[in-house]
Amino acid sequence: MPPSIRKLTGRIGAVVDGVDLAAPPDHSTVTTLRDALNEHKAIVFDDVQLDNAGQERVAGWFGELTTAHPNVPAADGTTNVLAVDSTTSKANEWHTDVTFVANPPQLTTLRSIVTTPYGGQTLIANAAAAYRDLPEALQALADTLRVVHTNQYDYARPAATTAQRQEYDRAFVSTPYEAEHPVVRVHPLTGERGLFIGGFAKRIVGLSSSDSADLLRLLQSYVTRPENILSWTWSPNQLLIFDNRITQHYAVDNYDDHPRRLNRVTIAGEVPTGVDGRRSEQLVGDASHYSRVLAVAA
């Protein structure tokens, strides 16, 4: 029986049933899942029985893994697993993962380890739908723009309130990275255009800081329209996979001081390409220890 795909909203998200994540992958199943990601941008599996190695193995169905993070240490002695843990960071800002390197991950996997009694949703936004929502004049402008992304959070990130979060933030920015990307990225598999901005986007090339902020704020408002968002409420033992090339996500900090932990594994990605065919460039920092560049879309 082929996997069952059930849509969650009109624009983003689907639940997948009928896939044994403990079994060796077969080409047909992986193709079906890749097609589901291309169409729905984010897919969810319920009642998964995976440990860290199992999550790494399933993530590997889609390509070569990155290490956990360019700066932040991996979880529990692993190489590829990043603990998304409320004790160290709440990640409550819209972003696409690791866009401060020239080849951000193509896909992100999140597995629920500790869930909250209420709140704690992960929001995922469809950046292709956001681009389609733009008026033609804004599309034409955005198609021509480049934007610098950085991990140096001083311009946007609120100050950490605990010693653990301060230490996490120190690690996050310990080696500076900057990459220049197209504001509109062309998806290498579908050809869709999507707004490639989010929380690491600092300045639009050729504009003043104030003009950059105003224009990024305007474009971002289309990404975060409610119609473009999946709000996922976590239960134990779930696996969420989303296309990091054409989405943004946000961890909602609405669960008081309850612990919350997801384990993240990401899959190496291509260097983004803009509408004009120009590729992204690394401006500051060498992230080769983090991820090999995926030369051919898989």
Image: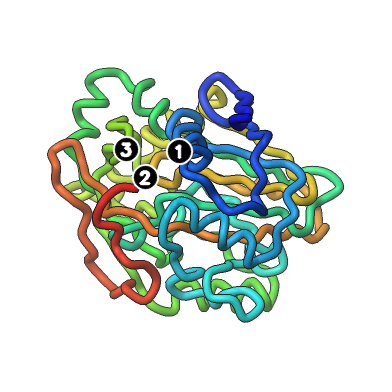
Instruction: Please report the residue visible at 42 percent of the width from the left and 56 percent of the height from the top.
Output: 63
Q: Residue at x 68, y 34 (%)?
A: 17
Q: CA distance from mark 1 to mark 3?
A: 12 Å
Label 1, secondary structure: give it.
Answer: helix
Residue corresponding to mark 2: 197
Furthest-right residue in this view: 117
Mark 2 secondary-structure assignment: loop
Looking at the picture, does residue 54 appear above or below residue 48?
below
- State the residue position of label 1: 31
> Who is closer to the viewer here, 141 or 108?
108
Q: Position of residue 274 (x, y in %)?
A: 21, 41
Question: Which quarter shows the N terminus?
Answer: top right
The residues tagged by marks 1 and 2 sit, at their Cα atoms, a distance apart of 28 Å
Kind of residue sitting beneath label 2: Ile
Q: Is residue 186 visible?
A: yes
| Mark 3 neighbour class, 10 Å CA radius: few under 14, some 14 to 19, many 20 or more | few
Residue at mark 3: 189
The image quarter containing residue 8 is top right
Find residue 189 and report its horizontal and vertical position in percent.
32, 37
Between marks 1 and 3 in the image, the one whose residue lies nearer the viewer: 1
Q: Earlier in the sequence, mark 1 or mark 2?
A: 1
Q: Quadrant of residue 234?
A: top right
Left or right of 139 in this view: 64: right
In the rendered structure, which disc, 1 or 3, sits on the residue that comes first in sequence? Answer: 1
- Amino acid on which disc 3 is placed: Leu
Does 29 sit above or below residue 108? above
Q: Are marks 1 and 3 in contact (CB under 8 Å)?
A: no
Indicate left or right for 81 with 286 as reference.
right
Residue 32, percent from left and from top = 49, 34
Name the residue type under label 1: Thr
Identify the residue at horizontal 48%, vertical 38% (top origin). 28
